[in-house]
Every structure is written in structure tokens, then in C-alpha cells.
Amino acid sequence: MAIHLHNEVWQAGEARALDGLMNRHYANYRTGLDSQGKVKAYASLYLYARIAEQALGPGTGHGRIAAREIQYLQQSLDEATSELRDHEIAEGIDLAMEMLNANSNCCFRM
């Protein structure tokens, strides 16, 4: 149920919902409820990191707090990447693109 609610918020255009989706998908993977949860979690984190980077990164006029947020997301993404096989990373990136393309309310495009 929580995944459904986070997905609704994401579909409404709120990128922060991706953080919740990532946590829920990974929890479902860890508890054995979804064998693909790890890839779905990676997709959500990857997309969130790219959106945050675009919105808050260098040249956007945001300060040190934003830079720390970007750094934290990138470190989290690096850790997640180290736990995945190459094909899982590719699947996650493809899924992230599908999530982005399916959301007409998101203002970010890759």
C-alpha cells in the first residue's frame, strides 16, 4: 500500500516521493516480498539523484546545503551500484527512464 501512495505522489509531480519509493522497494526486496525490489529501488534512487542534480546542482544558484544533498544522493547511488550486477544497473536505468517518461507532471527530462 505504501508503494501505491508514494507512486501517486510521484505521478502528481513530487520528486521527493522517489525517496519513499526507493525505501519501500528495497524493504520489499529485503523481506523477500519482491525479488525485483532491489532494481526498482535503484531506479527510484537513480531518478531522484538525477532530478536533484538538475534542480540543485552547480550553476543553479543553490548553496552548500543543496551541494551536500547532491553529494549524499550520489554516495547512496554509488553504494547501491556496488551491490548490483551490470545487467541490474542497466535494468534500473531503463526502469528510471520508463518512470520518468510515464510521468507527465514531472518537469525534468533526461
Image (cartoon, grey):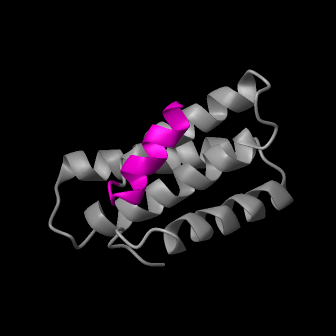
Q: Is residue 77 above or below residue 110?
A: above
**Residue 18 at least partly seen:** no
- Would residue 94 appear left or right of 55 to someone viewing this image? right
Q: Main secondary structure of the magenta part?
A: helix
Residue that appears at 72% across and 41% down: 38
Magenta span: 1-14
Residue 61 at x, y percent in the picture: 14, 67
Residue that appears at 57% across and 33% down: 24
Q: Is residue 73 above or below residue 104?
A: above
**Residue 77 at least partly seen:** yes
Look at the image and say whether residue 107 sits in the magenta stretch: no
Q: Nearer the viewer, residue 42 or 33?
A: 33
Residue that appears at 35% across and 47% down: 16
Residue that appears at 44% across and 39% down: 5
Tally of marks = 0
- Would residue 48 appear left or right of 87 to someone viewing this image? left
Residue 64 at x, y percent in the picture: 21, 49
Q: Quadrant of residue 90?
A: bottom right
The N terminus, quarter of image: top right
- Would residue 51 appear left or right of 44 to someone viewing this image? left
Q: Quadrant of residue 25?
A: top right
Q: Is residue 3 above or below residue 13?
A: above
Residue 91 at x, y percent in the picture: 76, 62
Residue pushed farthest top? 31
Look at the image and say whether residue 3 sits in the magenta stretch: yes
